[in-house]
Image (tube, grey):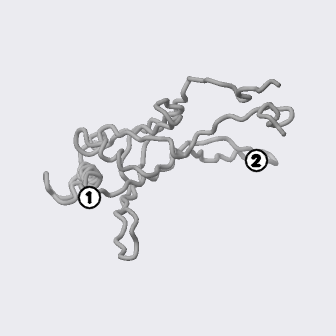
Amino acid sequence: MATLSEVGIAGIGNGILMPKLKNRWRVRFIGIGSSNSGNDLSLQATNISRPNLSFEEVQLHRYNSVAYVAGKHSWEPCSFTVEDDVTNKASKVVGEQLEKQQRLIGATGPWLNTEATASTYKFGAVLDMLDGNETVTESWKLEGCYLSSVDWGEGDYSASEASTIGLTIRFDHARQVLGTQVSGTAIGGLINN
């Protein structure tokens, strides 16, 4: 029978590291909707995509070959899903944010007007990956966010699952901060017989 110290890859090392689990996360919003409404959206969160980055490919043509260098980078939007609760708290936050981005129903001013600067309606978000307790193992700080699309879902008489709101969050920049707390080893506890 193999022990934990014998599991691994030859020439690389032994042991098993605990993976980050997809269901251990939280998202926090700064400045979304009206004041202090971000928690209402966070509590209803069911899934979110982590940031993805891509670089434009720049071709450098030379005498008889082509080389490639990285050009401008761009961040892909994050998809985010929340359950639409019967108290309408999640819907209210989304609606407030949409009104900040563009006055769609004219409740607080001229219809369809926008702010003079995007900084008036943009918000921040922090996506934390957790260890199953309260320790943050990885943090993504999203800056310059706005809702680029909202899918209010559908009604279905034959279904009994929760109604959801699908959001696409476009952002200007993301910063990854990795947790510095390291405990344990890949090998773990050894049993000596």
Taking 57 as reference, is 133 left or right? left
The percent position of residue 61, horizontal first and vertical second, equals 73, 47
Q: Earlier in the sequence, mark 1 or mark 2?
A: 2
Q: Quadrant of residue 191?
A: top right
User: Which residue is at the front of the view, 1 or 43?
Assistant: 1
Asked if residue 168 lies left or right of residue 52, the reply is left
* Amino acid type, residue under disc 1 in the picture: Val
Residue tagged by mark 1? Answer: 86
* Residue at numbered disc 2: 66
Residue 191 located left or right of residue 59:
right
Single out the mark in the foreground, 1 or 2: 1
* Label 1: element kind: loop
Q: Secondary structure at mark 2?
A: strand
Q: Residue at x 35, y 76 (%)?
A: 157
**Residue found at the very far right of the displayed protein:** 10
Which residue is at 42% across, 44% downward? 171
Give the vertical position of 79 relative to 131 (above or below). Answer: below
Picture coordinates of residue 74 (x, y %)?
A: 52, 45
2 w.r.t. 163: above or below: above
Q: Residue at coordinates 38% horizontally, 40% vertically from top-left?
A: 144
Q: Is residue 12 left or right of residue 141?
A: right
Question: What residue type is disc 2 on?
Answer: Val
